[in-house]
Amino acid sequence: MRQQAMSSRMIYNRPIPVSRIASAIGDKAQRNTQTYGRRPYGVGLLVAGFDETGPHLFEFLPSGTVLEYFGAAIGARSQSARTYLERNFDQFPEASLEDLILHGLRALRDTLAQDKQLLSQNTSIGIVGLDTKFTLYDNDDVREWLEKLGDVGSTRGRPQPVEPEPAATEDAPIADAPPPETDTVEPIETDD
Amino acid sequence: MDHNPANWGRPRADVYGPYNAAIHNAGPMARTQQPSITGTSVIAIKYNNGVMLAADNLASYGSLARFTDQERLIKVGEETVVGLSGDVSDMQYIQNLLERLIIEDNYEQDGHHLRAPHIYEYLSRVMYNRRSKIDPLWNAILVAGKKDDGSPFLAYVDLLGVTYSAPTIATGFGAYLAIPLLRKLAANDGDEKNITQEQARAAIDECMKVLFYRDARSLDKYSVATVKTDGQVTIEKDVRCKDMSWRFAEGIRGYGNQQL
């Protein structure tokens, strides 16, 4: 990918559009699925960037598929994050940078195994935008964001808040049952 | 008898020495050429809302004015004009390269287009790489359009890979005859903000007239391209030099100091 980006700068004096770099790596990966004796790449990627047509987020899969999203999550326990993003993505276009980062952290928090926490040692934040070159927040820089987030602990294994009574019905209000027990195998931490 | 099929049909190694396998990989000899059919000056000036270029319609075969309908200003993509002087066959090759560049860039249909600065960078790389192989494309090229910040873009690249940018540029004879006249309007970077389109056009027309007077390989029929910062590109064809005075020719006898 670096080669493609450098090549674009060298030949055309322009930063490569995000969609093109994503499809370039996608084509490379697809070839591995169709050539005798080769194996698919064993990684998935989220590629985020900003170009002339605005901000873009692409998910790259070893099959060579590249899809564009407003919000995405990958990894072992990413489904909870995906659910959070799906519920909240309407707010993203109008959200401030701070709100977006907090959305991301909340989505990430939902992936934590029971009794785990978001800490500055296991969390990184990267941002890129119109007048913002790619900036990485690591270790100590993350602490400020975790403080803004407030609750950094996993939400698994805790009783969920009771849903408010629906107005003007005859049915009894339904309270959420506590979520099922989490698996007993110690999962690997997913860093974003 | 030599049983190795690789040696059949070849001179005997014991008589002529070992076979030189480089023969198989040799391409045509490519060395510094001479241009054969050539176009003369291309001139250009930035003004407040864009860039204006002009180039005459002559393709000369040495001193013969061979083709009087050669268009040397080409529109590339949506917002860029490229003017070429020098060898016409190399010019046609470059035209082909640029056409393919635009077609391939449009495959993705992703809203990204190549603009003047990108086309210029691409051409500069091509020209420099050819010169580094001692097989140049024998041209001097002007690329005009607009920059990413919306201001007019005008730059030059030639057969040596030399590149530069200025508010007024001209190739060939134009560099000697036209640039001083164009610089009366725009001497320094930034002066183009004060030039109107009419002023630029008047300067261009005057320069083409002077070039027809003094460049012995020029023509009085030319094209004028206007590339505006709002994205409009127009190429006006078949413009002729007007109000010329050839009265001085009446009194001339012979050539130079020749006494007739």
Image (cartoon, grey):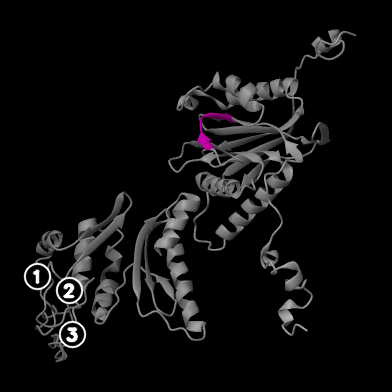
Residue B225 appears in which quarter of the rendering?
top right
Residue type at mark 1?
Answer: Asp
Is B37 located above or below residue A19 in the figure? above
Is A134 located above or below residue B25 in the figure? above
Q: Do tag 2 and tag 1 residues touch (Cβ < 8 Å)?
A: yes
Q: Is residue B166 magenta?
A: yes
The span from disc 1 to disc 3 (Cα, nearest Å) is: 21 Å
- The local crowd at label 3, few if under 14, some if 14 to 19, many if 20 or more residues have their Cα within 10 Å, is few
- The local crowd at label 2, few if under 14, some if 14 to 19, many if 20 or more residues have their Cα within 10 Å, is many
Q: Look at mark 1 in the image and give the residue it sits on.
A: A151
Q: Chain letter for mark 1, please.
A: A
Residue A151 coordinates in the image, percent (x, y): 9, 70
Whether residue B154 can be seen here = no
Is A29 located above or below residue A135 in the figure? below
Q: Residue at x 23, y 56 (%)?
A: A97
Q: Look at mark 2 in the image and give the residue it sits on.
A: A109
Residue type at mark 3?
Answer: Pro
